[in-house]
Image (tube, rainbow, N blue to C red):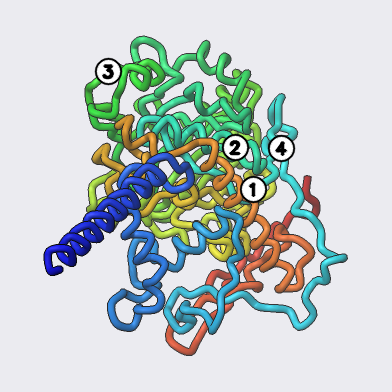
Amino acid sequence: MLNAFNLIIHTAASMLGVFIIGVLVFWFIQDVTQKKHSVLRNYPLIGRLRYLFERQGKYFRQYLFANDRDELPFNRATRSWIYKVAKDKSSTIGFGSTNDLNRPGAIIFVNAAFPILEEDQLPTPSLHIGQGYCEHPFEAKSIINISGMSYGAISKPAVRALSLGAAHAGCWLNTGEGGLSPYHLEGNCDIIMQIGTAKYGIRDQNGNFSKERAKELSQVVKAFEIKLSQGAKPGKGGLLPACKVTEEIAHIRGIPAYHDSKSPNRHVDIHNIEDLLDKIRILRELTGRPVGVKTAIGGWQFINELCDYINRKGLDYAPDFLTIDGGEGGSGAAPQALMDHVSLPIAEALPRVINALMQSGLKQRIYVVAAGKLVTSADAAWALCAGADFVNSARGFMFSLGCIQALRCHLNTCPTGITTHDQRLQNGLVVEEKYLRVANYAKNVNKEINMIAHSCGLQHARLFRREHVRIVQKPGKSMALNVLYPYPDKQEFPTEFG
């Protein structure tokens, strides 16, 4: 009798073991074949634990988990918001905000007593960059756009998803300094070609600027952007490690394969502001396309001298747009000393640049693109209040692709396939799924920017002014942005759009 009972127990245990193994095998196959979650495709066990902790963490937050707003460079609340809007899910929350409105630097918008009714709301007008100054002005429709991320720094499927998503959302895609690849063109979206200090993708065999290549590129890109510096590494050129310089990437950049790709820390053919303005005019006349400049800001001498030179030489020499990057770092890998301590944050740099343009009478001639850790609709709305016309984001769109902030962008081991050329890891990023998240993120950020505008009593987001936002200075006290950064005596506001 005892033997029979032991046999039953043994059989039941065996069947349970087979069942458990079967479930695990089923889950493994399900995880590695599904297309929505990159981490699950690449790391099934770790991925399931991650999603379990992410989903259940809010119930144990007071015991085990850090506050939603503590983590850097982007906290969990911000990342979760981006994941939601990228999946086109509601961003509605309950039981109050976890955002500390007493924290210095917190943004508070000035709501109107009588907000704009739905029937009175207007679509955000397009702006025509370069109109009246070049043969082919660029109609820019979206407030939020994709900042420069080079093919090489990010992977082929990431570039493809960004291109297709940008086309779907109607925003532009900046190539980054690595040059134009076939994957940037896959979605037939609006492309801005960035010209970095090494002239990747627009250089001759000797590494010098190629007029012939510029003319070829002008047939497929909407505008050019001369990059002087960026917030991630101001004062230092880009570096792509040899392990990322594949044959294809080397061909696109015009450099040897499997060697470190190092850019000079400045353009060797641009020695001063006058040289810069001459280059802008030459490139615009050569290509017929708008030409802009990207730079981080360390002080006021550069922007003041730039405005002075433009007024002396004439508006034909002015950049059609200025991309102002903050010193908060960026998607590119860089020495920590530069990321942490060099160039002004966007919160200070942007309003000062806008004031210089207004005071010199150039604000309507030069559109301003704000960049630098601006990933939410509130960030973008603040930038418009300060005086920007557009907002560029790199890391916001990386999160929309599935980035989990693993901080391994420079190691070729990105677990979500975004910043790696390891084919196995790239397989986790399914373009057909992720491009829709890119598009959803752009559309929903634009939508929420306008939602904030309507709550402030504005018909559309291009009517934002500094008086519509307050910045917390110390606990319990905020200050209107137009008091913190007063408009110059010579104010210059656009009277029409489009």
Identify which amino acid the numbered label 3 is placed on.
Ala
Q: Which residue is mark 2?
A: 318
Q: Who comes first in sequence, dot 1 or dot 2?
A: 2
Q: Of label 4 and label 1, which has the lower sequence position?
A: 4
Left or right: residue 494 versus residue 303 is right
At x 44%, y 68%, the residue is: 77
Given the image, on which type of amino acid does mark 2 rest? Ala
Spot the residue most to the left. Answer: 3
Q: Nearer the viewer, mark 4 or mark 1?
A: 4
Disc ID at residue 362 = 1
Cα separation, mark 1 vs mark 3, equals 44 Å
Mark 2–mark 3 Cα distance, whole angstroms, equals 37 Å
- Number of residues whose C-alpha sits closer than 10 Å to that of mark 3, classed few (under 14), some (14–19) or many (20 or more): some
In the rendered image, residue 29, in percent from the top left (x then y), is placed at 37, 42
Would residue 39 be visible to someone looking at this image? no
Looking at the rendered image, the disc whose residue lies closer to the viewer, 3 or 4, is: 3
Mark 1, secondary structure of its residue: loop
Residue 257's label in the rendered image is 3
Q: For the residue labelled by badge 3, is the local secondary structure a helix, a strand or a loop?
A: loop
- Counting other residues with Cα less than 10 Å from the Cα at mark 4, is it few (<14), some (14-19), or many (20 or more)? some
Q: CA distance from mark 4 to mark 2?
A: 18 Å
- Amino acid on which the number 1 mark rests in the picture: Leu
Q: Which mark is first along the chain, 2 or 4?
A: 4
Residue 281 lies, in percent from the top left, at 58, 27
The residue labelled by disc 4 is 139
- Between 286 and 1, the one nearer to me in the picture: 1
Q: Amino acid at mark 4?
A: Glu
